[in-house]
Amino acid sequence: MALREVRIYGDPILAKECKPVKEMTPRIRELIGDMFETMYELEGCGLAAPQVGILRQLCVIDTSDEEHEDQRFVLINPEIIELSGEQTGSEGCLSLPGKHGTVTRAQHVKVRALDENMEPFELEADDLLARCIQHECDHLHGHFYTEKVEGELLDNEEPEEEGEESEEGEMEE
Ligand code: ZN
């Protein structure tokens, strides 16, 4: 596995529509591994293929924490089939380091996708995972969270000591 270069906001590739993944290949498998590695290195909780320059409908997500132990997913060709409720919170993106903004999204989401073995599955999510799924799916269709930011984009504060994060935490995708 290897780290991939993350495209920065303003790169035209981030505004493009991604094509579906037709079949699993060694290259795509490698891409998935690299995307997880890159996301963990940058301490994000989601990363979409166009963010590493690949225009395919593929994203990786890991919103696991002490409360939610198993929230690591590969979503291939994801399709959001249900959205309900509302949550307003802080959101950031690995393609726009050092910034965050307030974004309102659906509280609950149901998504249909293929996993890394190209097996179909459905996933229902709330809270941070639901936010993350919506953010990543937006990337696959050329959308960026700044389109949805309410008010100003803000500068991130210097990293705080461990354990001092607010209840909702910061999200970087
Ligand atoms: Zn993002």
Image: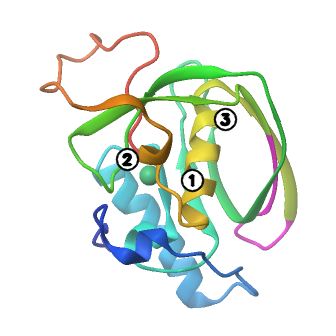
Q: Is residue 132 magenta?
A: no
Identified at 54% across, 36% down, the residue is 63
Task: Confirm or reject: label 2 Cβ below 8 Å from ligand 1.
Answer: yes
Labels 2 and 1: the sequence-earlier one: 2
Task: Confirm or reject: label 3 Cβ below 8 Å from ligand 1.
Answer: no
Q: Quadrant of residue 24?
A: bottom right
What's the residue type where badge 2 is placed? Cys
Span colored in magenta: 110-119
Marks 2 and 1, how far apart at CA: 10 Å
Image disc number at residue 76: none
Task: Confirm or reject: label 1 Cβ below 8 Å from ligand 1.
Answer: yes
Q: Which residue is mark 1?
A: 136
Picture coordinates of residue 71, whole percent (x, y) = 63, 38
How packed mark 1 is, by other alpha carbons closer than 10 Å (few <14, some 14-19, many 20 or more), is many
**Rendered view: 130 above or below 117:** above
Picture coordinates of residue 158, whole percent (x, y) = 12, 26
Identified at 56% across, 47% down, the residue is 135
Picture coordinates of residue 76, whole percent (x, y) = 70, 67
How packed mark 3 is, by other alpha carbons closer than 10 Å (few <14, some 14-19, many 20 or more), is many
114 sits left or right of 163 in the view: right
> Which residue is at the front of the view, 129 or 162?
129
The answer to whether residue 34 of the structure is visible from this angle is no
Image disc number at residue 130: 3
> Which residue is at the front of the view, 43 or 100?
100
Labels 1 and 3: the sequence-earlier one: 3
Q: Secondary structure at mark 2?
A: loop
Identified at 56% across, 53% down, the residue is 136
Q: Which residue is mark 2?
A: 93
**Rendered view: 131 above or below 112:** above
